[in-house]
Every structure is written in structure tokens, then in C-alpha cells.
Image (tube, grey):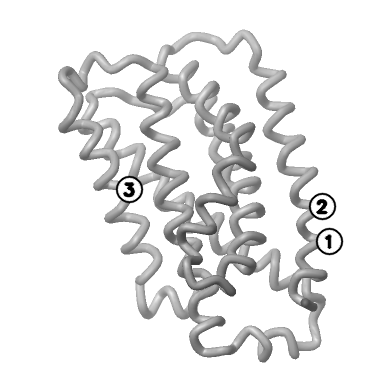
Amino acid sequence: MLIELKSKEIVVTITLFSLLVVSIFAVTSSNPSNLSAEIGSGIIWASIVFSGSIAMSKFFSHEEKNETLNAVLLMPVPIELIFFGKILSLFLFLTISECLIITAFSILFNSNPLSIYILIAIPVFNLGFSCVVTFFGIISSKSRSNEILLTLLLIPIIIPLIMFATELTRAGLEGIASQNFNLWLSLGILFDIVFLVVLTFLFGKIIEQ
């Protein structure tokens, strides 16, 4: 976080890419003011997913480029704390990008996506997304085509999480109660719990290798 406060590298990347994606959808839409809830929710979360995956490619770039990951591992702390620290950092950066995306979406599409549904979807999505991306970030950092590899690994795994977030956002944009709210919320929370536990265990094994 201290490095990011000085360089602003990840925040600028997320901000510019998020605004660019939303702007492209707005420009190519024939009537942005009458955008359907299904398409609107897809635009929001597609922007978040791709901006987050691009930012994650830089999360381990400093450790890989400067070969500092081994030095970090020498600290007298559990390896899991390194994993949780990366998750927390990405969680915060995602929250910043989501605020910008929602603001830009509201202005460009003349729609207010803020509702109790999206406020619930954001933290649940961010936790699961940050956990999965952090895990695969350390793997893809060892590859020359790390950005492409990260996206290929990431998208298929987080499909249930994307479905959960888009469904709740769609209900919020339509201004109606979600009929399967408990089912989708259970799916999102279950995804977070399973992957947080499993990937925390596997992270230590991957780091040792």
C-alpha cells in the first residue's frame, strides 16, 4: 500500500481502464438512457472483472522484477499472512474502481445502479475475486505471458461469482425484489468460503515450490 501511495501505478491503471470500458459501451449504445437491466449489469461487472485482472498482473510484478518475493518469505510470519495482505490490497483497489465505474455508469447511462443489492454484491464479489486472482497472480508471475495466462485461468473459475453479482445488480437496476435473492447470496458466500479455505492452504504449497 505504501508503494502504491507513492507510484499510483495500480490505481491509475484501474481508473483509466474502467472509465475507458464504460465509455466505449456508452458510445456504441444507440440509446444509453433506455439500456436494459441485463445489459447494464453486464457492463458494470465486465468492466470490474477486466480492470481487476489487469491490475492483478502488476501486483506481483515488483516481487518478480526485483526478486523480492524470496526476501518477503524470509520474514518470521506465517505465509498465509502474505496471502491475506495481497487479498486485502486488491479488495481496496477493487472498491475504488467500483466507485468510479458506478459513478461513470450513472452519468453516461443516466441510471442509478446503487441499491441494497449491489451494496451486498460488492463485498461478496470483491472477497472471492481477490482471493482467486491473488492465488493465480503468483502462478502467472512466473510466466512470460502472465497477463494472458491470468485472464485464461481467472474467467472460467469466477463464472459463478459473476452470475451472482450480475443477477443482484440486475434486480437493483430494475428496482424490483430479486425472487432468488437467498439462493444467489448463498452461492456467493459459499464461493468465498470454499476458495478462501482451499486457496489459503494451496498458497503455501505453491510458494514452497
Sequence-wise first label, 1 or 3: 3
Q: Amino acid at mark 1?
A: Phe
Count of numbered tags: 3
x and y percentages locating residue 30 in the rendered image: 16, 20
Gap in Å between the C-alphas at discs 1 and 3?
Answer: 32 Å
Q: Position of residue 155 (x, y in %)?
A: 55, 43
| Residue pointed to by mark 3 | 18
Marks 3 & 2, CB-CB < 8 Å contact? no
Mark 2 crowdedness (10 Å alpha carbons): few <14, some 14-19, many ≥20: few
User: Which is more toward the observer, 136 or 76?
Assistant: 136
Q: CA distance from mark 1 to mark 2?
A: 6 Å
Q: Is residue 50 left or right of residue 73?
A: left
- Tell me the CA gap for discs 3 and 2: 30 Å
Quadrant housing the C terminus? bottom right
Q: To which residue does mark 1 refer?
A: 201
In the current view of this chain or complex, which residue is farthest to the front? Answer: 144
